[in-house]
Image (cartoon, rainbow, N blue to C red):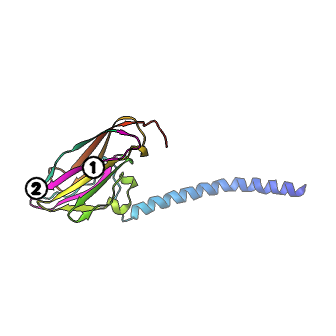
Amino acid sequence: MQKTNFVQSAFASAKGSIIPLMVGVVIVGGVSVVAYRAISPQQPLATFSEMLPVKATKGATLSIDREEAELGVMSVVDIRSADFRLRNTGSQPLEISQVRTSCMCTFAKIETSNGQSPEFNMAMHNDATVNTWKGLVNPGEEAVVTVTYNPVLMPVEGSVARNVKFATNDPQNPIVELGVHATVQGGSLTR
């Protein structure tokens, strides 16, 4: 009987001191994360609507074949893509950076004369090396942006618009947004 009282007493005593200890651990952990982010050499992570400024280059001139593409009627389990052709009609290299999509169901890749980019998604879902990727399109050359929509990742039904956004050093086109549209059927189905 005394053993039971001792265990209950020890538990009650520990319970009173463990809560302040846990609160302290959470506070110290939070301060550590804030301090790490403050001194970390990583570039800031901008949201879809926030783009970091890019230094404009006089003579870098972007021409786009279209800014929107229609993917048509599709099932929620279909995957469709559209290509957008970018051309540097200027006299200086065109830089493309900060590529991100508006939804986790939308992906983008960019093919330049130097090869293919990594696959882009929302900035928060991209790896740090993906978020810092930069592509160059030399004067007279083209790049192809492939936008892929996979509705099953965010099931919806009806008219859907998704976008890809990126920054350039073209003074007239510092931020470019390309869009795809689809009419999704069967979006209420779950996996």
- In screen coordinates, is 60 left or right of 100? left
Q: Amino acid at mark 2?
A: Thr
State how far apart marks 1 and 2 are (Cα): 20 Å
* Residue at image coords 71%, 53%: 15
Q: Amino acid at mark 1?
A: Lys
- In screen coordinates, is 175 left or right of 40? left
Assign a secondary structure to mark 2.
loop
Residue count near mark 2 (Cα–Cα under 10 Å), binned few <14, some 14–19, many ≥20: some
Assign a secondary structure to mark 1.
strand
User: Quadrant of residue 186 in the image?
Assistant: top left
Circle 1 residue: 165
Circle 2 residue: 89
x and y percentages locating residue 106 in the rendered image: 35, 48
- In screen coordinates, is 97 left or right of 142? right
Check if residue 48 falls in the magenta segment.
no
Magenta region, residue range: 74-102
Question: Which numbered disc flags the more N-terminal residue, 1 or 2?
Answer: 2
